[in-house]
Image (cartoon, rainbow, N blue to C red):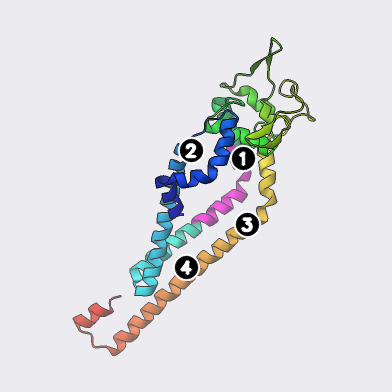
Amino acid sequence: MLGLGCILKYNSDLLNHYLEPMLEAFRENGYEVSLTDLYEAVSVILIGLGSAILTVGSLGCCGACCKLKSFIITYTVIVLAVTIAEIVCAVLLFTMRKEMESTLQPMLQASIRNSYTGDAGVDVTTLGFNFLFTEWDCCGVHNYTDLHLATKWDRSVMLYGFQFTMAIPLMCCKLDGTFPNMVIPKDALCALYPHSSNSNYHKGCYAEVEKSINKYQYIIIGSGIGVLVLEIGSIIASIYLFKELLFLKRKLLAVTPRTPRVWGVLNF
């Protein structure tokens, strides 16, 4: 994680080599996308998390190898705090799901209202929503009416010399291909007159993404339980090692003269 963060921050050209086909596809479709800001944000997160994990792991290894009680205690406390935080988050996720939905959905709607600019938008928010619309075959948070509130989307379009108002963006039509290489819909008027056979106007993205996540919920839960077991195992091992060090210290003190020099050596 730390290495990937450093690569993103200091040698992003290496990753651009693999992403160039995707970036070229964006350019061919009229999108000028720069990943510099994204690289910067992701690299900071990865470097921070990687450094924290490396530091905690080093504390545990040094404490175990060098028999340093302070390191073992610090490692145990940190891992215990992380484990408790994960359990609390998992409990809140399952017990306050409705409350979280009632908060998240208005936030997504506000993002559409304040930032969505339509099919040709190149900002991160618009690209993100257009990706959702095409990959999950959906439209809006609940349905297409969410997009009618978008203040930055110019819905007017000239066709055959007449001006029309789009009901949905083309991204909400039934399209072939993957984002951003989509084929123009067979029904060219789907953005003006959408119905269930030529568009996904009635399907909300929140529900569709939720369905996709639910398909893998057992894998996610199993992975979470696996991580939790490893963390609890490391806590138990640290406590056991700490007790062994205390036992060893008491045993050595019982058979060793109590001189200042000896006490200094045994003060591990």
Pointer 4: residues within 10 angstroms few (<14), some, or many (20+)? many
* Magenta span main SS: helix
Q: Is residue 19 left or right of residue 65?
A: right
In this view, 28 is above or below 157: below
Pointer 1: residues within 10 angstroms few (<14), some, or many (20+)? few
> Residue visible at 62% across and 36% down?
131
- Examine the image and state in which quarter residue 136 appears: top right
Q: Tell me whether the residue at label 4 lies in contact with that at label 1, contact meaning CB atoms closer than 8 angstroms.
A: no
The label number, if any, that marks residue 101 in the structure image: 1
- Residue 63 lies in the magenta stretch: no
Give the extent of the magenta segment: 85-104
Q: Earlier in the sequence, mark 2 or mark 4?
A: 2
Q: Tell me whether the residue at label 3 lies in contact with that at label 4, contact meaning CB atoms closer than 8 angstroms.
A: no
Q: Which element carries disc 4, helix, strand or loop?
A: helix
Pointer 4 residue: 235
In this view, 258 is above or below 3: below
Q: x, y percentage for residue 240?
A: 45, 75
Q: Is residue 143 left or right of residue 29?
A: right
Q: Is residue 88 visible?
A: yes
- Residue 101 lies in the magenta stretch: yes
Q: Tell me whether the residue at label 3 lies in contact with that at label 2, contact meaning CB atoms closer than 8 angstroms.
A: no
Q: x, y percentage for residue 69?
A: 35, 71
Q: CA distance from mark 4 to mark 1?
A: 34 Å
The label number, if any, that marks residue 221 in the structure image: 3
Q: CA distance from mark 2 to mark 1?
A: 30 Å
Kind of residue indicated by mark 2: Leu
Kind of residue indicated by mark 3: Ile
- Examine the image and state in which quarter residue 197 appears: top right
Q: Earlier in the sequence, mark 1 or mark 3?
A: 1
- Examine the image and state in which quarter residue 186 appears: top right
